[in-house]
Image: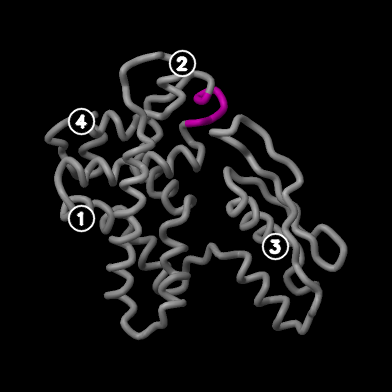
Amino acid sequence: MNNFESLIGYKFNNPYYLERALTHSSYNREKNTKHEDNERLEFLGDAFFDAIVSAELFKLMPNVSEGKLTKTRAQVVCESSLAQAARKLELGKYIFIGHGEEACGGRDKESILADAMEAVIGAIFIDGGFEQAQRFVLHAFDDTMKDAVTGKLFSDYKSELQELIQKKGKNESIRYLTVNEEGPAHDKTFYVSLMYDGRVIGTGKGKNKKEAEQRAAKSALVRIRGDI
C-alpha cells in the first residue's frame, strides 16, 4: 500500500480506510473475509468529487451559464474520466478483487476503476478531511479539467449527435433502444442500438444505460458524420 500512497501523494493515518477503498465486492464474495467493500466510501467520494469539481469550474469559468457549467462538470465526473485518472495512478494493481472478476479483466474495467477512484476520494476525506480530499482531486484531475474548460474534452456524444442532425435540418427523431442485458443484477452490461430514420446507425454497451447510449452515439458520429 505504501507504493500506492506515494502515487496519490497522501499518507493515510489509518490504513484501514485505504484498504476498504480498494476492496471490490467480488473479493468478499469469494474470500468470505472481514474486509468491508468500497461501496459506502464510493457513495461518499462521489458527493465530494462533484462538489470539488463544481467549485473549481465555478472559479475557472466565471463568465459562462449554469447550463455550460453543468455540461462541463459532466465531462469531468463521468465514469471514463474517473477510470482514466485511476489508470494513471495504476490503481488497478492495488485492488482487492475476486479471481472470477480478475479473470474477466476486472482490474482494468472502467466501472470498477471509477468506483474505486471515488472510494479513494471518500477514504481520504474520512482520514484527512476536506482539504486533503480537495488537494487530491485537483491534482489527479488537473489535466482533465483544463481540457474540459478549453473545449478539448468532449464526452456528451448524444448532445453532439443531436446538434449535428439539427444543423443539417433533419427532422427525424433519434431513439435509443436497449436490446439486451447481461450479467447479475449487481454487475449488468447493457446493449443499446441507436435508431435514426428507420435504421440502426450506432451501437454501444456499458455498465448502465446512459453509458451504453453515449457509446452508441459516439459510434454513430464516427459512422455518419457528413452523411446524414
What residue sits 72% from the left and 61% below the top?
220
**Disc 3 designates what residue?**
222
What residue sits 33% from the left and 66% below the top?
54
Nearest the viewer among 117 and 143 is 117
Label 2 element class: helix
Give the mark nearest the N terminus, 4 or 1: 4
Q: CA distance from mark 4 to mark 1?
A: 19 Å
> Is 44 colored magenta in this rendering?
no
Give the mark nearest the N terminus, 1 or 3: 1
Q: Say above or below: 168 vs 77.
A: below
Q: Amino acid at mark 3?
A: Val
Q: Quadrant of the N terminus?
A: top left
What mark, if any, has residue 2 been given in the picture?
A: 4
Q: CA distance from mark 3 to mark 2?
A: 41 Å
Q: Which residues are magenta?
A: 101-106
Q: Amino acid at mark 1?
A: Arg
Q: CA distance from mark 3 to mark 4?
A: 43 Å
